[in-house]
């Protein structure tokens, strides 16, 4: 369940690329979500495992519904306002959702090679 009626975005705190993305979100996207690394989160409280969180970004809505990967990105953006909200709605549209999921998987598999990524 989300904390204090706020959704929660759970990310991989050991990933430098993920850290850069979270900094971008915190500075540019106004969301009411609590943003926490899975290494610091009480995952049992959210019904999540280390494995799930190490593979993909997780969004836990106020009703406890969990979305992962590109669906988590879309939920985060939808929780904001303005152009970010619209982008989140677009990403969550059926056909675009499939493309976004594929793109997310490519990025997730190669995140250590992306700018800010942690070298192996």
Image (cartoon, rainbow, N blue to C red):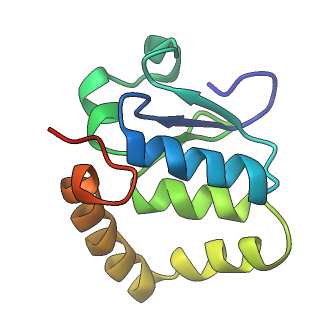
Does any portion of residue 57 appear in the rendered image? no
Q: Find residue 118 and report its horizontal and vertical position in percent.
A: 28, 41
Residue sitting at x 37%, y 59%: 115
Residue sitting at x 47%, y 60%: 71
Q: Find residue 84 and report its horizontal and vertical position in percent.
A: 73, 72
* Residue 96 occupies quadrant: bottom left
Taking 103 as reference, is 120 above or below it? above
Whether residue 36 sits left or right of residue 119 in the image: it is right
26 vs 105, nearest the viewer: 26
Q: Find residue 75 and report its horizontal and vertical position in percent.
A: 61, 58
Whether residue 87 sits left or right of residue 95 in the image: it is right
Does any portion of residue 13 appear in the rendered image? yes
Residue sitting at x 32%, y 22%: 49
Taking 34 as reference, is 46 above or below it? above
69 vs 108, nearest the viewer: 108
* Residue 13 occupies quadrant: top left
Whether residue 1 sits left or right of residue 67 in the image: it is right
Q: Quadrant of the C terminus?
A: top left
């Amino acid at each position: 369940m989300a904390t204090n009626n706020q959704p929660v975005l759970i990310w991989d705190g050991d990933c430098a690329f993920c850290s850069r993305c979270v900094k971008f979100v915190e500075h540019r996207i106004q969301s009411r979500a609590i943003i926490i690394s899975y290494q610091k989160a009480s995952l049992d409280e959210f019904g999540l495992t280390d494995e799930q969180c190490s593979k993909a970004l997780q969004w836990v809505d106020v009703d406890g519904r969990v979305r992962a990967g590109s669906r988590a990105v879309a939920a985060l953006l939808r929780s904001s306002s303005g152009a970010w909200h619209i982008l989140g709605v677009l990403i969550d549209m059926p056909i675009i959702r499939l493309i976004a999921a594929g793109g997310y998987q490519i990025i997730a598999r190669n995140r250590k090679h992306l700018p800010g990524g942690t070298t192996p």
